[in-house]
Amino acid sequence: MESNRQKKVAGVLQKDLAEVLQNALRNSGKGGVIVSVSKVKVPTDLSMAKVYISVFPNDKATDILTEINQVKSTIRHEISQRTRHQLRRMPELQFFIDDTLEYLDGIERSLKREENPLEDPSLLPRRKKS
């Protein structure tokens, strides 16, 4: 169960990260790619933030994640500047691809019998809990 403090910090980080990532993409010339921050999870000690991003088109997700991880320290610095009056300590950032929509699309296709996961179990890979 998340505390109100955790929710507040996650909300602030999510809003600011979305703006910073969109600006960074715009400035890097990747205009055709849309990145949104779908979720931010913060533990009780506020030491780390797990940031889940959705990328459209989906085939660019791993490239975008690699680029974000290369400039993670710059992103963290910019977020700390934006949140310096709200957060005492800036948490470490960990970025992950949010594949929820893709996973749900696979389930929907299976339900419509376009693909049968009973015949081919590799259609719906096991999900890792994070």
Image (spheres, rainbow, N blue to C red):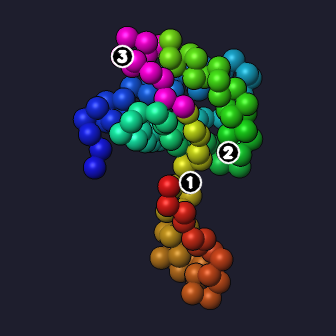
Q: In the picture shown, does residue 63 fall above or below 32?
A: below
Q: What residue span does the magenta drawing correspond to?
A: 82-92
Q: At 54% across and 31% down in the image, what residue appears?
A: 92
Give the prevailing secondary structure in the magenta stretch: loop
Instruction: Characterize the local packing of mark 1: few (<14), some (14-19) or many (20 or more) Cα atoms within 10 angstroms.
Output: some
Q: In the picture shown, does residue 86 fall above or below 61?
A: above
Looking at marks 3 and 2 on the same chain, the residue that comes earlier in the sequence is marked by 2
Q: Are marks 2 and 1 in contact (CB under 8 Å)?
A: yes
Label 2 – label 1 distance at C-alpha: 10 Å
Q: Amino acid at mark 3?
A: Gln
| Nearest the eye: 105 or 125 | 125
Q: Secondary structure at mark 3?
A: loop
Nearest to the eye among marks 1 and 3: give it.
3
Q: In this view, which residue lies farthest toward the left?
A: 4
Can residue 117 be spotted in the picture?
A: yes
Q: Give the numbered dot on residue 61.
A: 2
Quadrant in which residue 14 is drawn: top left
Q: Is-magenta flag for residue 38?
A: no
Q: Secondary structure at mark 1?
A: loop
Looking at marks 1 and 3 on the same chain, the residue that comes earlier in the sequence is marked by 3
Q: Amino acid at mark 2?
A: Ala
Q: Give the numbered dot on residue 86.
A: 3
| Nearest the eye: 2 or 30 | 2
Label 1 – label 3 distance at C-alpha: 30 Å
Q: Which residue is the site of mark 1?
A: 99
Instruction: Characterize the local packing of mark 2: few (<14), some (14-19) or many (20 or more) Cα atoms within 10 angstroms.
Output: many
Can residue 31 be spotted in the picture?
A: no
Q: At 71% across and 46% down in the image, what residue appears?
A: 62
Q: Amino acid at mark 1?
A: Asp
Q: Secondary structure at mark 2?
A: helix
